[in-house]
Amino acid sequence: MLRKLAVLSSVLMLTGCRGTPATQAVRPATQAVRPATVGPEGQYLILRQSPGAAPIWMSPYKAVEVAEFENELPGAIKVNVAQAVRRETVALLLQSKNLMSVVPVEGFRRGGTPTPTLVITGRLLDITSDKIPGEKLLGTGNQLIARVKLCDKTTGEVLVDANVRGWVKSAADFNEEHLATGVARGIKKLLAKVCEWKE
């Protein structure tokens, strides 16, 4: 129960990253409106950001390596979920015009590169389901929580440390790979924020 309350606390903090400020609710008629996200959604909460993670220093990163995600709850989180998080993260980042290279790797290994490279590492912390009566009472919905770090490949410095939440609106949708897609979307949003991407 204590673990579930801790997870709920993380979720409540993450919900502060969702939504659009009221001041931005009304858009000029000439401004294009982005289509709403369909299916799984992702959120992030930055826990720590080093001085080297200011946008002026982050924008030169044009290459990303995505390491395998560690699974801290192998009894609850299936192996395919960790694999899906990395696969979906790579697929989403490959769509970005801000990156020259996105490569899946087994783990984080320091080394010099011709192009400034970020390494994404992560740990899957928890998964919840409305199918479990106790968790349905908490009202947290179906979600997957991950701890994600953005590291400089050359120096090994952790530039950004964040919690990322993937979730689905429908409590009836407990396809765990959909939750993995949500985490991947949260990771892309995190990168877009700290690197000030213009999509």
Image (spheres, grey):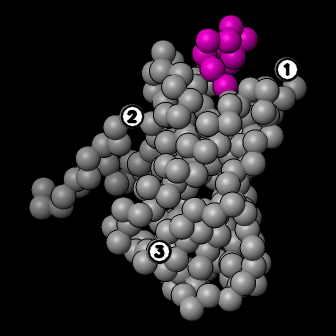
For residue 94, which numbered disc appears in the image?
A: none
Label 3 neighbour load within 10 Å: few <14, some 14-19, many 20+: some
Of the 4 image quadrants, the one containing the C terminus is bottom left
Image coordinates for residue 76, horizontal then vertical, percent: 74, 26
Ranked by sequence position, the earlier of labels 2 and 1 is 1
Image coordinates for residue 154, horizontal then vertical, percent: 71, 85
Q: Residue at x 59, y 79 (%)?
A: 117
Magenta segment boundaries in residue numbering? 128-139
Task: Check if residue 129 falls in the magenta segment.
Answer: yes
Q: Nearer the viewer, mark 2 or mark 1?
A: 2
Q: Which residue is drawn at 30% across and 43% down?
A: 36
Image coordinates for residue 28, horizontal then vertical, percent: 18, 58
Q: Furthest-left residue in view?
A: 30
Q: Furthest-top residue in view?
A: 133
Q: Write down the residue under mark 3.
A: 101
Q: Nearer the viewer, mark 3 or mark 1?
A: 3
Three-letter amino acid code at the position of disc 1: Met
Q: In which quarter of the image is residue 92?
A: bottom left
Three-letter amino acid code at the position of disc 2: Gly
Image coordinates for residue 172, horizontal then vertical, percent: 48, 15
Does residue 122 appear to the left or right of 142 in the view shown? right
Q: Residue at x 61, y 45 (%)?
A: 83
